Image: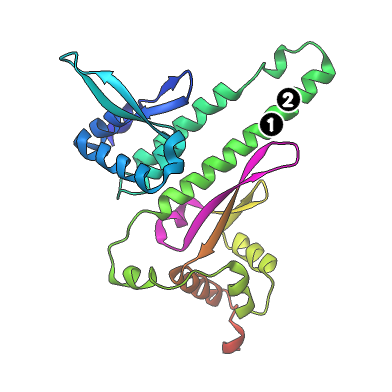
Amino acid sequence: MQDLLTIKIENNSELGPVVSSRVLAEQLNKQHKHIKATLKEMLEIRQNLGASIIENNYKDNMNRTQVEYLLTKKGFNMYMFNIQGYYDYKEAYIDKFEKMEEQLKQPIASYMIEDPVKRAEQWIAEQKEKQQLELENSMNKQKIAEYEPKASYLDTILQNKSLVTVGQIAKDYGMSAQSLNKLLHDLKVQYKQSGQWLLYSKHHNKGYTHSSTTEIEHKDGSTSVRMNTKWTQKGRLFIYELLKENDVLPIIEK
């Protein structure tokens, strides 16, 4: 998409990286008033988004005071999950948010510290933060792709079925969740990053999974994000067909 040639995220001194609702209107080719109406409705439904979707005043070309919304990464994610398409656009913006956040969070670079012990400690901290950002970025990409609609009758039916955990599917084959996860890894379905199983990108938008994230607060006050992924009935059927091709059958068919 040509729209992706310019990624317009500004750095707000109080909020960090944000994107204006005016920019979204311009690049999505939508009317600003419609985007503002959607954001206002989201704020009314979920009041906890107030720190992620912030009302702001600006002067238009006629020097009149107008209202826009500034969206943090979370606010941007929540809005984009509510609209169809624009996958490349979403992914490009998520990448840009991640890079800007990483730059802002970066304290004194480890190579600038003279004390060898403190330099080593800082380097370890930098690597942990980098790994966490990379993991969150991968999770965001998978979540965004899962929201991409597939206009088929089969998908419509399957979306109304219940979600299942990998452990529930594993029981059908008489194996543990750990064994099934490893098997799916060997079959190039998923990979492990920082202890988290993630789908390879070619499976993202197939409607196989549905994921949600949970923020975990640790004893030292730090936080991390954990993603809980469940399989749709379409994903369950995909696993069945894939394992069958590799001579792995559920217990009921043996």
- Where 113 falls versus 180 (above or below)? above
**Range of magenta residues:** 200-225
- Whether residue 34 appears in this view of the structure is yes
Q: Which residue is mark 1?
A: 127
**Residue 59 in which image quadrant:** top left
Horizontal side of 198 relative to 122 (left or right) equals: left
Quarter of the N terminus within the rendering: top left
**What residue is at 32 percent from the left and 40 percent from the top?**
39
**Residue 29 in which image quadrant:** top left
Mark 1 neighbour density, 10 Å: few (under 14) some (14–19) many (20 or more): few
**What residue is at 75 percent from the left and 41 percent from the top?**
219
Residue 239: give x, y in percent of width and height: 52, 70
Residue 18: give x, y in percent of width and height: 41, 27
Quarter of the C terminus within the rendering: bottom right
**What residue is at 71 percent from the left and 15 percent from the top?**
111
SS of the residue under disc 1 = helix
Residue 80: give x, y in percent of width and height: 36, 44
How far apart marks 1 and 2 lie (CA) works out to 6 Å
Q: Amino acid at mark 2?
A: Trp
Q: Is residue 112 magenta?
A: no
Asked if the residue at tag 2 contacts the one at tag 1, i.e. Cβ–Cβ closer than 8 Å, the answer is: yes
- Where 22 falls versus 146 (above or below)? above
Q: Which residue is mark 2?
A: 123
The outermost residue toward the right is 117
Q: Is residue 216 magenta?
A: yes
Q: Amino acid at mark 1?
A: Gln
42 or 133: nearer the viewer = 42
